Amino acid sequence: MKVVLACDLGGTNLRMALVSKDGEIIYQLNDETPKEKEEIIKRLTLLASMCSSEAQKIGYEVKALGIAAPATLNSKEGIILEAPNVPALNDLPICTILEHNLGIKCFLENDANAAAIGEQYFGAAKGVNSLLMITLGTGVGGGIILDNKLWCGADGTAGEIGHIVVEPMGAPCGCGSRGCLEQYSSASAIVRMAKEMRIDYPESILYSKLFFSAKEVYEAGKKGDKLALKVFEQMGFYLGIALAGLINVLNPEAIVIGGGASKGWELFIPHTIEQIQKRAYKQPAQRAKLLKAKLAEMAGVLGIAKITFDKISSVAMPNI
Amino acid sequence: MKVVLACDLGGTNLRMALVSKDGEIIYQLNDETPKEKEEIIKRLTLLASMCSSEAQKIGYEVKALGIAAPATLNSKEGIILEAPNVPALNDLPICTILEHNLGIKCFLENDANAAAIGEQYFGAAKGVNSLLMITLGTGVGGGIILDNKLWCGADGTAGEIGHIVVEPMGAPCGCGSRGCLEQYSSASAIVRMAKEMRIDYPESILYSKLFFSAKEVYEAGKKGDKLALKVFEQMGFYLGIALAGLINVLNPEAIVIGGGASKGWELFIPHTIEQIQKRAYKQPAQRAKLLKAKLAEMAGVLGIAKITFDKISSVAMPNI
């Protein structure tokens, strides 16, 4: 059987897997993402080699390696351009290097784009032709599929849904702008908003905690903590503002919402839906199904596997 | 020679023209758009017949009629759905009716979509593959061309750039939302903002005028009137907010800006560019050229002509 190596190279975690054409994960290795460029390359080479050996043992043929990275990138040339959360990857011609190290063809795609393809082929959006994927993680990522094709834009940088402005004079964003969606609907935004707003909620469980995570805000919210509920209301409100705009502009069939912070679904989604109903045109608003992502942390791996299979079937494979 | 009838059915004006395949306007009739449904149909039938007679006289063969309408619509079925500025058109199966009256095939497209195609083939964006068209008129319309294809969305309602939220708690919009781009960057918004802000500008030419138009605000601005300049600053600021988001999400090659209110270009565009530079990612911001529309009020007519030629060359023509 033919398989591909599929790698999700995240800011914190690194996943390398052998994946079959129908999305079956045959073998998988997880690791932490090293901080230094050389270490990252070494680790990727090692994990890929280990997976390849495993494949050989069980008689599978490894056709290529696909890498999903949290970065703007030049997919055609296989070069990572800017990776705000893993700066070591900036300007890295990762495909050329790994092709040299591993002797197999290597492909590169943005992680949110890969997740979009993953959810479309193997997850929540099976059978949907046009969809937006939004990942509410440390940041907010996005992928756009129109008529079954990833829309990457003129430079391959499209899909930055997290950097739609939803509050013109709002919180400063790492991208240099202010009031980006990412500042209201990401895991880090949940923590920031809770810290900013807690002065008005002395009765909150979170009032006097030195440190807490988005998960703790969620757990407080589940227990009825008013501060936490207000935070998720804000998160859902601004997500709704951004989605209403995207629905009016792109009229997609579905919007898949994933990422760690999407676990707070029942606390924020009613506010998101309220804003969409108030603000988007009726027909496209009714059309756009809001779907909870199904593949969790495997969306990137499965998506880049699918993309890699498509690439090797569409290009003539040189012997390298 | 083969020609098509191309009609721009606007909220105020109605244009019917004989257009050749290379965008030459051979004959043209202008009229006002009647208020009643029956009157509109009668007028369209009359103008189309007059143009057809003219074509016959000079030996041209009329192949079909294309209509551009300021509405959400079902292009496939030829039905207008919602036309906020010409409510008489709501739910009108305009193609079936005109095909019956005229005996030629009839096609329908949104006016901003038609203008986008017009500017791409005959105007400011020749040779550009992926572009956004924004018309700053009474309202703010939009058209999206990705990889040389009009992106109309799952229901044909895509492109409503005017209804991106740029100020969550901003001015109420006719669409039911608040703070839409249309409320800040349209001709009507210019007048509204000037009226709201003039209390702080007693020295303004506009301070004590009972009625004034967007054009008068522009003329005041050209003379250095501070109120007028502030209004255009606001207009450009919010346009920049919306465009920065679209650049991050869609990474287009160009953005064509047209419509009556775009005549204030030199007063608002510096503020638009400032926001884009501050807020959009560097690479896609550099890529997206801001282009002034070239075809003015003829963009719709020329675009729907091009669309109509494409349709008749791609479908088998039934005898009707």
Image: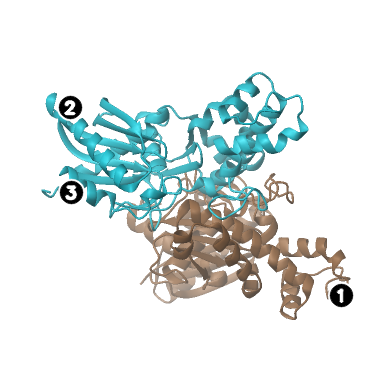
Chain colours: A cyan, B brown
Instruction: Give the answer, above or below, for where B240 lies relative to A21.
Output: below
Q: Which chain's residue wears label 2?
A: A
Q: Amino acid at mark 2?
A: Glu
- Mark 3 or mark 2, which is nearer the start of the sequence? 2
In terms of secondary structure, where does tag 1 sit? loop
Residue located beneath label 1 in the image? B203
The answer to whether residue A41 is seen in the rendering is: yes
Residue density around tag 1, few if under 14, some if 14–19, many if 20 or more, within 10 Å: few
Around disc 2, counting alpha carbons within 10 Å, would you say few (fewer than 14), some (14 to 19), or many (20 or more)?
A: some
Instruction: Name the front one of labels 3 and 1.
Output: 3
Q: Amino acid at mark 1?
A: Glu
Rendered image: mark on residue A54: 2
Judged from this view, the residue extending furthest toward the top is: A223
Task: Please give left or right for residue B157 compared with residue B230 in the image.
Answer: left
The image shows residue B1 at horizontal and vertical percentages of 35, 72
Residue B44, image quadrant: bottom right
Residue A243 in the image: x percent, y percent?
Answer: 56, 41
To the question of a shared chain for discs 2 and 1, the answer is no
Kindly indicate whether the residue at mark 1 contacts the one at mark 3 (C-beta within 8 angstroms). Answer: no
State which mark lies toward you, 2 or 1.
Answer: 2
- Disc 3 is placed on an element classified as helix
Query: For the point 55% across and 60% down, which residue is it?
Result: B45
Measure how far apart labels 2 and 1 are at the Cα level. Answer: 80 Å
Question: Which numbered marker is on residue A100?
Answer: 3
Q: State how far apart marks 2 and 3 are (Cα).
A: 20 Å
What residue sits 59% from the left and 56% below the top? B242
| Side of A299 relative to A104 (left or right) | right
